[in-house]
Image (tube, rainbow, N blue to C red):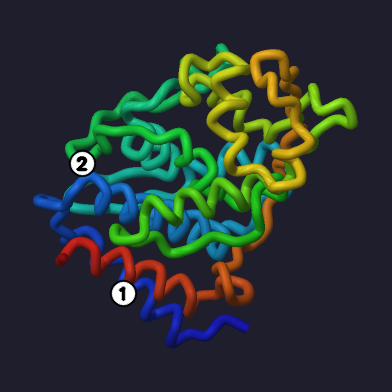
Amino acid sequence: MVDKAALRGFLDAASELKSANLTGLSEIEKAAFFINLYHVMIMHGFLVFGVPATVFEFVNHFGKIAYEVDDDIMSLKELEHNIIRANMKSPSQFIGRFVLPKQVYKNALRKGDYRFNFALNCGSLSNPGVTQVYTATGFDFQLDEASREYLKVVEVSSSGRTLTLPKICQWYKNDFGNGRNEDIVRLVVKYLRETDQRHLSPFLSEVRVRHLGYEYKCRHLQHAGSSYIDVAHLTSFSVCSSLLTTE
């Protein structure tokens, strides 16, 4: 059963974001704020529309919910691609380059980071079941932790010459250096489990890269160190995000 008091608190906190003032925030503060906001919007959408269980529901989910923040109105799709990923590469899929929104936002991030791909968690079963509240002070460390968590599913062949990575490393391969297999392997290897690092061939340029499939069915996220993110947890997410606007 939904805690109505917690729900009202969350909705009140979310509505206050429209009057947030992001002017003067550093790039890191904005990045932490927007990644937190992404997870708030994902879970808010799950509460209102249900958890996507099919490809069709998954794709539509990102255009169903929108927030107003600092006089800008943004859908989940726009938040991800036009703000967080504003200065990162387009997906490698040919069609994806044409269906993405084109809106320009005043608070869009100026710098990209390939680790954003591991930090953004849409709730897919292919993603970790947990996420965290990002802070400006611990942001770099948290991105490293998110990368390690995401890459726990990596598989190394018995020969050590084939590395099977999450599908997202294929979709957004151009975020990893020049997008070559060698570039991707060199960037992710430090986040692999120690046993996988030892087993992987040291001749990284010769490592063959494959990719896991992607699961479009989703689940409710958990906050790292706690249980299912219910309405109360969503409130803490939004409050944390709101605090960043006043620092």
Instruction: Residue at 48%, 46% (x, y): give it.
Output: 64
**What residue is rendered at 36% in x and 60% in y?**
138
Q: Name the residue under label 2.
A: 107
Is 94 situated left or right of 21 in this image?
right
80 or 147: which is nearer to us? 147
If you read the primary sequence from the N terminus, does the residue marked by circle 1 or circle 2 appear first?
1
Instruction: Please tell me how many numbered marks the rendered image carries.
Output: 2
Q: What element carries label 2?
A: loop
Q: Work out whether residue 45 or residue 159 is closer to the camera in this orientation and state it.
A: 159
Q: In this view, does 70 lie to the left or right of 200?
A: left
Image quadrant holding the N terminus, namely bottom right
Q: Which amino acid does label 2 sit on?
A: Asn
Give the x, y percent position of residue 72.
22, 45
Of residues 124 and 148, the one nearer the viewer is 148
Q: Which mark is residue 100?
A: none
Q: Where is residue 172 in the image (x, y as percent from the top left)?
A: 54, 26
Which quadrant would residue 108 be assigned to in this image? top left
Q: In which quarter of the image is the C terminus?
A: bottom left
Residue located at (53% from left, 31% from top)? 187
Q: Residue 201 vs residue 28: left or right?
A: right
Residue 71 lies, in percent from the top left, at 17, 49
> Which residue carries the number 1 mark?
12
Q: Which residue is drawn at 36% across and 39% down?
A: 84
